[in-house]
């Protein structure tokens, strides 16, 4: 969500040693081993769905996951959002793992962009250190706003 944009201005504001549930780390590692950036569109949707269902169970919440029907793989994921009113995450554009985790940050931490970024960026960094370094090198922190 871009409302009330209290986005962190730099990565340094966000990087910290956040504690995650053991189950969350296990679910993310399983997702990682499914190769989330590989496969056909339906296959990749299914990988996200499995992780999503696992997170719903772990945090005992009932959140729906929708995909933009006109999903375009090379398009920005910036319009993705979590809508608390109907408890639905909608993913737009490319299947961005970081964006997906960011929306889960909103599920768990509410509207604060700072808290959503902190939860998602550190989790992504923990599970996907190589991808994280690549993002930092390429985007210089602009990926924080999602
Ligand atoms: Zn957000």
Image (tube, rainbow, N blue to C red):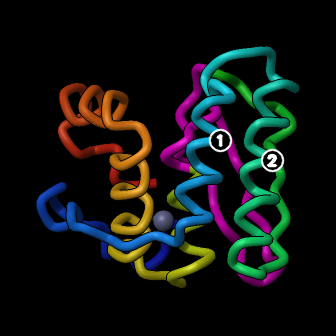
* Quadrant assignment, res 45: top right
* Quadrant assignment, res 93: top right
Q: Secondary structure at mark 1?
A: helix
Q: Is residue 94 rendered to the left or right of residue 17?
A: right
Residues at badges 2 and 1 in contact (C-beta under 8 Å)? yes
Give the extent of the magenta segment.
74-99
Q: Is residue 17 rendered to the left or right of residue 87?
A: left
Magenta-highlighted stretch: main secondary structure? loop
In the rendered image, the vertical position of residue 93 relative to residue 54, given as above or below: above
In the rendered image, the vertical position of residue 91 relative to residue 64, given as above or below: above
Name the mark on residue 50.
2
Q: Secondary structure at mark 2?
A: helix
Q: Is residue 9 rendered to the left or right of residue 119?
A: left
- Give the Cα separation between the discs numbered 2 and 1: 10 Å
Q: Quarter of the image for the N terminus: give it.
A: bottom right
Q: Residue furthest top?
A: 39
Q: Which residue is mark 1?
A: 30
Kindly identify the residue that appears in the image at 68 percent across and 42 percent down. Answer: 92
Q: Residues within 10 Å of mark 1 (few under 14, many from 20)?
A: some
In the rendered image, the vertical position of residue 34 relative to residue 67, given as above or below: above
**Nearer the observer, disc 2 or disc 1?**
1
């Amino acid at each position: 969500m871009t409302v009330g944009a209290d986005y962190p201005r730099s990565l340094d504001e966000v990087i910290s040693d956040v504690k995650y549930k053991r189950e969350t780390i296990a679910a993310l590692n399983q997702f990682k081993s499914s190769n989330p950036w590989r496969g056909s569109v339906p296959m990749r949707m299914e990988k996200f769905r499995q992780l999503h269902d696992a997170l719903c169970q772990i945090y005992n919440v009932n959140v729906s996951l929708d995909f933009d029907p006109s999903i375009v793989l090379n398009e920005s994921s910036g319009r993705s959002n979590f809508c608390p009113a109907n408890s639905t995450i909608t993913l737009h554009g490319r299947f961005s793992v970081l964006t997906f985790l960011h929306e889960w940050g909103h599920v768990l931490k509410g509207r604060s962009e700072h808290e959503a970024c902190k939860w998602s960026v550190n989790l992504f960094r923990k599970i996907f250190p190589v991808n994280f370094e690549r993002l930092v090198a390429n985007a210089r922190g602009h990926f924080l706003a999602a």
